[in-house]
Amino acid sequence: MSKKLFIKTYGCQMNVYDSQRMIDTLKPLGYELGETPEEADFIILNTCHIREKAAEKVYTELGRLKKLKQDGGDVIIGVAGCVAQAEGQEMVRRAPAVDLVFGPQTYHRLPELLRQVEQDRAERDRLQVAAAEAGHKPAKRKPLRLVDTDFPVEQKFDELVAETESQGPAAFLTVQEGCDKFCSFCVVPYTRGAEFSRPVAQVLDEAKRLVDQGVCELTLLGQNVNAYHGETAFGQTWGLGQLINGLAEIDGLERIRFTTSHPNDMTDDLYEAFRDQPKLMPYFHLPVQAGSDKILAAMNRKHTRQQYLDVIARLRDMRPDLALSGDFIVGFPGETDQDFAETLNIVTQVSYAAAYSFKYSPRPGTPAADIAAQVPEEVKSQRLAMLQELLNAQQEAFNHATKGRRLSVLMERAGRVEGQLVGRSPYMQAVHVEAPQRLIGKIVDIDVTYAGANSISGTVVTHDLSHTPTQTQAA
Ligand code: SAH
Ligand code: SF4
Ligand code: F3S
């Protein structure tokens, strides 16, 4: 009989990828993906620890899920991801409803962990029946509660079950995991461990399987994806640019993206890929976090404002139409009005097509959390509002600049409005168009007629549907 699995995913794209792999891994055990926690036999919360709010969401959700057990249900509740890794045993104490706590490097052991929980429960049931038969009041037996937060990352990728679930035309593929940078605000080096690159052949094989399932756009994932240095079968080491070129040779793979990168890990082969590789999309997410050298140093980013600007200049040299996006933190400890003005100023200088911005959130165990000069919440809110106003205006301006152009768009799924499809332009813009369902999974040319703050829309160019659509070339 099939059992139902419910997964709720928080945080970054790597968690989205990981959740997919957990689904694949549990399939041979008879688990099918369900729609609600109520019908589930096994619930997984795949969690994020990056900011306090993200981590707290998990406990709110666990509070809700607890009721499923109080009502006598036999559901197994597991917590995966970065909160699981960071809190481990502590989580079991804080949230008694949890049966399993397992970190990001243990997902290949999921079948074994589940078997242990199931065996433990069977034993509990057996003892209860025996007690009832003997006329005793069944003794309360504490179920087993497992915590597995081991670290060897190599093994995971070797042992995870091959992907079976179709992900639609655009899919994620983790090529690198972990981080050695230790930015002073960030939990990732503690939750994901040391930097590790998957071997080239493993990545190419997985990409081919995904393309066979109908994927035509791949986003390569890594906490520091441009630090990728994978071994080839011939003992060479490939950087990300070489990997992108290798992947581009796969027939049927039309578009390649990657995220997230660090300014200090730029290599010649990656710059050149933006110039020479037509399958690499002209969109680059390169966080700078702050514009002041003083704050960059305190963040342990190990580069200056000017070094970041030099990287951007060289990228634009390679690919003049490159759309840039970034991450920003406001209110890092010690950030003055002057420092913040420099963040606004670097944003103006670069001009972003999209961006993510956050109020600094002190994270337990990170060096910045112990700095005395924390910025008041109110000041953080004001700065965030100012920064977002500027970033939103830039995004809208970027969208407007594409009005009147013909862009190739990958149609990913049906839109909310009947008869509408949603896709992505080469620049990652969300695109809404009236188009027939059969175009889902296809790359079509769109004449952009409308540009809003968050998306663009236009009309499908029908006359050349039989031709290969134009990939946007560098201007
Ligand atoms: N590896 C990526 C990003 C990892 S986390 C990089 O190096 O940029 C994603 C983003 O969350 C970060 O870029 C940063 O902007 C934000 N972030 C990380 N820790 C944070 C914290 N303690 N408070 C607020 N934002 C944070
Ligand atoms: Fe975190 Fe910095 Fe590593 Fe990015 S580079 S994951 S921000 S420590
Ligand atoms: Fe969050 Fe972990 Fe990703 S902390 S952002 S889920 S790497």
Image: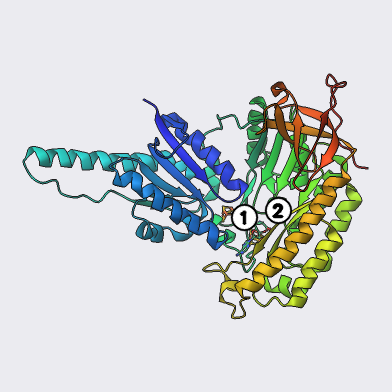
Q: Is residue 266 above or below residue 106?
A: below
Residue lying at the far left of the rendered structure: 135
- Quadrant housing residue 248: top right
Residue 474 visible to an observer of this rendering: yes
The residue located at (56%, 30%) in the rendering is: 165
The residue located at (82%, 30%) in the rendering is: 459
**Where is residue 284 shown, x and y percent of the image?**
78, 49
Q: Nearer the viewer, residue 314 or 228?
A: 314
Q: Is mark 2 within 8 Å of ligand 2?
A: no
Instruction: Report the residue marked by disc 2.
Output: 227
- The number of numbered discs placed on residues in the rendered structure image is 2
Other residues around mark 2 within 10 Å, as few (<14) / some (14–19) / many (≥20): many
Q: Nearer the viewer, residue 462 or 176?
A: 462
Lower position in the chain sequence, tag 1 or tag 2: 1
Q: Identify residue type, mark 2.
A: Ala
Q: Identify residue type, mark 1.
A: Glu
For residue 256, the mark is: none
- Quadrant housing residue 377: bottom right
Label 1, label 2: how far apart the Cα atoms are: 9 Å
Q: Nearer the viewer, residue 135 or 456?
A: 456
**Where is residue 374 shown, x and y percent of the image?**
61, 77
- Quadrant housing residue 182: bottom right
Instruction: Report the residue marked by disc 1.
Output: 195
